[in-house]
Amino acid sequence: MQFQKVQSVVLPPIGHDRPTRVLIVDDSKLQRKILTSSLTRLGYEVFEAASGIDALMMCQKTPPEVVISDWMMPGMSGLEFCKAFRDLTAEDYTYFILLTAKSGTPDVAKGLDAGADDFLTKPVHAHELRARITAGERVVTMQRELTEKNRLISDTLSELKRLYSSLDSDLIEAKKLQQSLVPERQQRVDGADVSLFLRSSGHVGGDLVGMFPAEPGHVGLYAIDVSGHGISSALMTARVAGYLSATALDQNVALRKDDDGTYLFRKPSDVIETMNDLVLDEMKTEHYFTMILADVDLMTGRVRMAQAGHPYPLVQRSDGQIEQFGPGGFPVGLMSGISFEDFEVQLAAGDRLLLLSDGVTECPGDDNELLSEEGLAKIAAELFDMRGHAFFEAMIWRLSEFSGADTFPDDISGVLLEYGGHV
């Protein structure tokens, strides 16, 4: 005869809303009557079955919490019934007691192997019967509590997975939006090539690079690194991007509109001071950021810059010579009343200017030593013949070799201006 598994039935805790259900399985009608009488007086709900086959059929309809089964029965023995019962029962555990005259160690081992939890030796004493069932109730109650806790954990994990999937989808879209802040990664402007690079350590990051047009023959370049990582940093970069807009020049704090309608570049140091005040007065955030802002005169090659805690700009001359310089400066958004300093560099045809975030210079090697400015200078020298985005791709390759990993702990961003001279 084939028996199907009992469907899971969520039962209230034992001893709370109903008595414990006990199934007695014995071919002796007298033995069943004695046990039933004793258990009924103790307050248990008792069911009887004269054989293992009958008991299995009853268990499919009404799963018990405790089974007391005789070992020696015609047809299906108590041992065989126990094995079949363990295959039959579902999520809720049932405490199985074998009733036997056998007490030897091999017999006990057989019973345990078959799935029995405990043994009662004939003749059964009422006090011992009650004690064994009480022990079984404790086991079943603990198992039910554990099952419920596991169910709650499973439900919680499922909800967390759903939320994570939703969040992951939102972060992917956020990354697309953040990347859209740098719509054109490479542009040709009046005798110079400008390449922009942005790579977040996670879905979204706190780095931002960009460029914007200014007065005739001028272009503005900037590199920004917001403290921290993740969504809040990315939101701040989006806000800061609006202050240096390439499309809404009226809103660009780096520019002032002349009487003839021309947008003139303000002193970079004054621009950063303005941004410092805006962050402290309007954003009300614990985030701050480092930045470099550059006003490039494409006609003369003169570059006027201001630095606010960002890594030093790197100039690579046409003969390969490398220069790194700058006043350092204080990050934006930490303190009010901070002043910043302008400095200049003169580019000649064939020179290039590189602005990078500290995700490069502070990239850790496999020995935890940072790349540093010296390491960056070495990479730049080795990649002297690389141009545009090929330079950034090769730089990432070298960083991977240095760190021994394909991913990096911080965002990496950069601006590369390759000056060809005024045409």
Image (cartoon, rainbow, N blue to C red):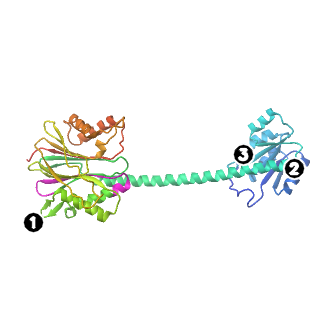
Residue linked to disc 2: 126
Q: Is residue 84 magenta?
A: no
| Tag in front: 2 or 3 | 2
Q: Percent position (x, y) of residue 48?
A: 84, 51
Name the disc covering residue 251, or none: none
Q: Percent position (x, y) of residue 204?
A: 36, 51
Label 2 neighbour load within 10 Å: few <14, some 14-19, many 20+: some
- Left or right of 88 on screen, residue 229: left
Whether residues under marks 3 and 1 lie with C-beta atoms below 8 angstroms apart, the answer is no
Which is nearer the eye, 307 or 106?
A: 307
Which is nearer the eye, 281 or 260?
A: 281
- Left or right of 418 on screen, residue 48: right
x 89%, y 43%: residue: 123
Q: Earlier in the sequence, mark 2 or mark 3?
A: 3
Q: Is residue 226 magenta?
A: yes
Label 1 neighbour load within 10 Å: few <14, some 14-19, many 20+: few
- What is the residue that sits farthest to the top in this orientation? 106
User: Does dot 1 land on a helix, a strand or a loop?
Assistant: loop
Residue linked to disc 3: 88
Q: Earlier in the sequence, mark 3 or mark 1?
A: 3
Region of the chain picked out in magenta, as a range? 214-235
Q: How many marks?
A: 3
